[in-house]
Amino acid sequence: MATTRRWLWSSFLLPGTAWLAVLFLVPLGLVVAMSFGTTNVIGQPVYGFHPGNYAQVFQPIFLPILERSVVYALVATVICFALGYAVAYTVAMFGGRYRNLLILFVILPWFVDYLVRIYAWVELLAQGGLISRALSSVGIGGRLGVQLLGGTPAVILGLVYNFLPFMILPVYVAIEQMDRGLIEAGKDLYGSPRQTFFRVTLPATLQGVATGCVLVFLSAAGDFVTAQLLGGPGNYMIGNLISDETTGLASLPLGAGLTVVLMLLMGVVVLAYMRVSRIETAVR
């Protein structure tokens, strides 16, 4: 009877397993296979085994783009941590009965399409846009206003705006689940508010911080729409490169190779996160 019941419950995993296999594992396998492929005389992709494709991936022309993507993702993650922790802490500690409503306001922009949100920032940052006119009204930028698009600050701003909820939500959950008595104990031991935060609150919520950092970093590193719409030629990210290379069939093997390298980089980040989480769980 127990065996039958276990088989019955296990059978409910089959639809989800089949879904992942068809829509994730199979496409992933095709991308990996194509990364070793080549093209024929008319530019159509042909499967084969050509490891030399990865030598092209690591050409000096592509490495700065990969480095830029990692740097942008790291900067966006740090900013999201600073802003997200402050928001999550304030809502969790002082939100009272309005906490759920405040969290709803955090995720509400996500009900709007991604492209619509990016184009809204295009209108805000463009020369003659709302922010440009506001700066012009106080004498910054002259009558034509300031051109805020096409630079690194605009791209970082877009990444932070889009992925900030990924930091706020896990940190908020971690603070909510934290034993508030620890904070009171820190105060009873004559710890200043600063000491109590860095020695009690922050260590107790590191799991949420780590989760938020991983989510923001992975999402920002693979993003390409933000750099395409808010940045300029000098803000090209690895996602933009993959998009351009896979648009033309002649470059599909190279685009697949770049995709595999990006996924390996993300896999390293995920494995590091899992190891840190395992160590923290063991300590507890």
Image: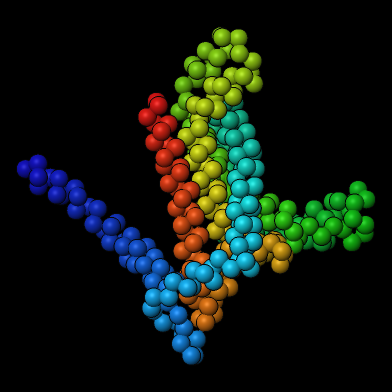
Quadrant containing the N terminus in the rendered view: top left
Q: Residue at x 62, y 57 (%)?
A: 67
Q: Is residue 8 above or below residue 33?
A: above
Seen as rendered, the residue at the extreme left is 1
Q: Is residue 177 above or below residue 236?
A: above
Left or right of 282 on screen, residue 266: right
Q: Quadrant of the C terminus?
A: top left
Against 187, residue 231 (above or below) is below
> What is the tally of numbered marks visible in this picture?
0
Residue at (58, 37) in percent of width and height: 102
The x and y percentages for residue 257 are 48, 68
Question: In terms of image quadrants, where is residue 94?
Answer: top right
**Residue at left offset 62%, top offset 66%:** 60
Visible in this render: residue 116? no
Task: Determine the residue positioned at 50% across, 39% down.
Answer: 210
Q: Nearer the viewer, residue 35 or 52?
A: 52
Which of the two residues, 183 or 102, is positioned nearer the viewer here?
183
- The reply, left or right, for residue 125 in relation to residue 14 is right
- Vertically, is 99 above or below 10? above
In the orientation shown, which residue stands out farthest toward the bottom?
Answer: 41
Query: Is residue 145 visible from the viewing direction of this image?
Result: yes
Residue 137 in percent (x, y) is at: 90, 51
